Image (spheres, helix red, strand yellow):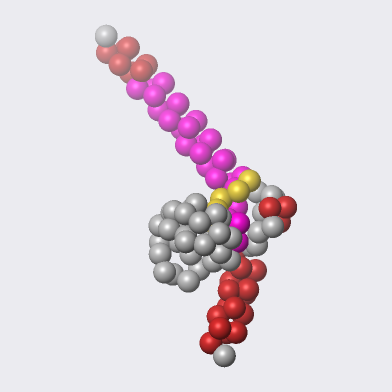
Amino acid sequence: MKSNIAVAAALATVMSIGVADAVQAQSKKKEKCYGISPAGQNDCGNLAGTHSCAGQSSVDNDIGEWRLVPAGTCKDLGGYSREEAKEIYEKMQAKKNS
């Protein structure tokens, strides 16, 4: 009986390690892509810092909002890296304030 519990525990440990590795591998194959989120479909906080939650965007394709996409596809989707989006966002704010 004790050996069955030990085997089950060992198997559960091995399986959980496999799942954790798969999740890590999957996250490495994704990238944040700015400027492609439909309203209400962003993945998390925005560049402006006006919210920190998924689904809070109010405008389609807002340059400050992002979604996770498969690595290497952001440009094909018409999106921007964080650095590019931040530069565009800052230019828009400067123009707005002048």
Say which of 64 and 40 sits in front: 40
Question: Is residue 96 at all visible to an observer of this figure?
Answer: yes
Residue 26 is situated, as x and y percent measured from the top left of the image, at 56, 41
Left of 3 or right of it: where is 19?
right
Residue 69 is situated, as x and y percent measured from the top left of the image, at 60, 48
Residue 78 in which image quadrant: bottom right
- Magenta stretch containing residue 33, yes or no? yes
- Magenta stretch containing residue 62, yes or no? no
Q: Residue furthest left?
A: 1
Question: Is residue 33 at all visible to an observer of this figure?
Answer: no
Above or below, 10 against 25 in this view is above
Residue at figure coordinates x 60%, y 57% from the top left: 36
Above or below, 18 against 70 in this view is above
Left of 36 or right of it: where is 10?
left
Residue at figure coordinates x 50%, y 30% from the top left: 18
Residue at figure coordinates x 57%, y 40% from the top left: 25
Residue 43 is situated, as x and y percent measured from the top left of the image, at 49, 53
Q: Quadrant of the C terminus?
A: bottom right
Above or below, 66 against 70 in this view is below
Residue 8 in which image quadrant: top left
Q: Quadrant of the N terminus?
A: top left
Say which of 10 and 80 sits in front: 80
Q: Residue furthest bottom?
A: 98
The chief SS type of the magenta part is helix
The residues colored magenta run: 9-36
Left of 2 or right of it: where is 45?
right
Say which of 22 and 59 sits in front: 59
